[in-house]
Amino acid sequence: MTQVTSTGPFGTTTASAWDHSPAEFDFRSDTLTTPTRSMLAALESINLGDEVYSECTATQSLESRIASLLGKPSALFVLSGTMANQLALRALLVQPPHSILLDSRSHIQLHEAGGVASISQAVTVPAVPSNGKYLTLEDVHQHAILSNDVHFAPTRVISLENTIGGVIMPTEEVRRIGEWARGEGIKVHLDGARLWNACSVPEPSAELLGEYARHVDCVSVCFSKSLGAPVGSCIVGDKRTIANARHMRKAIGGGIRQAGILTAMARVGVEEVFFGGKLGWANAFAKVLAEKWTALGGGFTLPVDTNMLWLDLEGRGIDDGIWKEAIEEGGVRISGDRIVCHYRECSHVNYGSEGG
Ligand SMILES: *Cc1c(COP(=O)(O)O)cnc(C)c1O
C-alpha cells in the first residue's frame, strides 16, 4: 500500500484516506470504517436546512427510509449508538422505580457509562444467557421482576442486542420474547447497532430487518459502525415514543443544525454498503480467517455467525504477550482475542466478479 502524505492546515495527513482507509489493516472494531468517496460526493447535492427547525430534507428522507425499512411509523437521527439506546430507553420508561432486563454482556450494561442510571434513573438486571450465545424467553422468565412487592424495581423494559458479539439472535426468539412481554405490559428495545450484519446473511434482506422490528417497540441502528458513515444512529418506534426521544435529544444537546452533512453520508452507507452487499464481504472474510484458524488447531469462544471472531487463545495454549507480538509483527491491529472484519479491509482486494 502506498501512502501519499501531504501537509495541510490540520497537520500532515494521508492524502488518499478516502481511498486507502486507515481501517484497512485495523480489525479492532468495525467502528473504524471510514467514509467513502461516494459519501463525500453526496454532500454536494444536499440542501443545508436547519434540522432543529425541521428544515433538513436529507435528514427527513433518511428518517423516513429507515422507518419504512423497519416497518415503524417514525424514526429519529441521533449522534451515536449510545445516544440512540439511552434516548430509546428514556422514552420507553415512565418513572422509577423501574428496571431494565438485559444481557449481562450487552453494550448498554457495559459500555454506556452507566447512562441508564443517570438519564433514566433505572437499575439494570443483567442476565447471563443460559445457552452462552443470546437471551431466550426462558432466561427472561427467570430474571423478569413482575411483582408489585415494594422491595423490587419492576421490569418495565427488556433490552435485546442483535448481533451480540457477532452472534445472530434468531427472529423466532425475538418473537417469543416480544409476544410474552406484550402480554405482561413490558416494552422491548432492540439495540441493533449491528442489525445490518444480522440481516446480511447470506445477503442483505430488508424483509428480515422488518421481521426483527415487528416484535419489539423500539430499535436502534448504527451508521458509523459497519456502514462507514462518520457519525450517527437512528431510533425507530411509534410516533409518541419517537417524539418523546426527539424532545429529550434536544435536552441533552443533541439537536443538530445542518444535520444533512451527516445524514447524507449515512444514507449512502445504507444504500451502498448494506444494500450493496459489502457486509457480506466482511462475513466472507471472517469465514476465511475462521477456516485458517481452525486449520491451525484453534477454536472459538463464540460462533462466527457474521463479521466477528472470538479466538480461544487459552484453549490453544497461546500466551498473551506472544500473541501481541505476533499480531504487531503481522502489521495488523486487533483487540486481544477479538477480530472484527469490515468491508474496508476488502476494498482493495478483488473478490471476484463483483470487483469488490
Ligand atoms: C457500538 C455499539 C453501540 C454504540 O456505539 P457508539 O460508539 O455510541 O456509536 C451500541 N450498541 C452496540 C451493540 C454497539 O456495538
Image: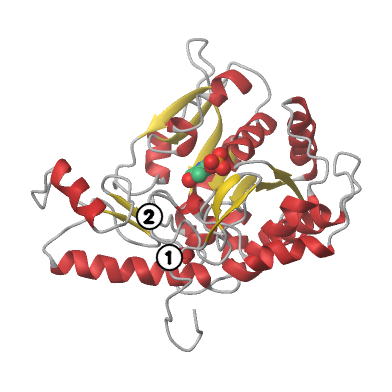
* Mark 1 Cβ and ligand 1 under 8 Å apart: no
Relative vertical location of residue 315 with respect to residue 283 in this rendering, above or below:
above
- Secondary structure of residue under mark 2: loop
Which of marks 1 and 2 precedes in the sequence? 2
Relative vertical location of residue 279 with respect to residue 221 in this rendering, above or below:
below
Report which residue position mark 1 lands on. 345
The location of residue 195, given as percent across then percent down, is 53, 56
The location of residue 280, given as percent across then percent down, is 46, 71
Res. 73 visible in picture: no
The three-letter amino acid code for the residue at tag 2 is Phe
Asked where in the image residue 217 lies, by quadrant, the reply is top right
Report which residue position mark 2 lands on. 27
Q: Which mark is residue 177?
A: none
- Residue at image position (82%, 46%) is 258
Q: Residue furthest bottom?
A: 353
Please say if the residues under marks 2 and 1 sit with CB atoms less than 8 Å apart.
Answer: yes
User: Which class describes the residues within 10 Å of circle 1: few (<14), some (14-19), or many (20+)?
Assistant: many
Q: Report the colour scheme.
A: secondary structure
Q: Nearer the viewer, residue 212 or 177?
A: 212
Q: Is residue 155 left or right of residue 185?
A: left
- Residue at image position (46%, 38%) is 107
The CA distance from mark 2 to mark 1 is 8 Å
Asked where in the image residue 229 lies, by quadrant, the reply is bottom right
Q: Nearer the viewer, residue 51 or 39?
A: 39
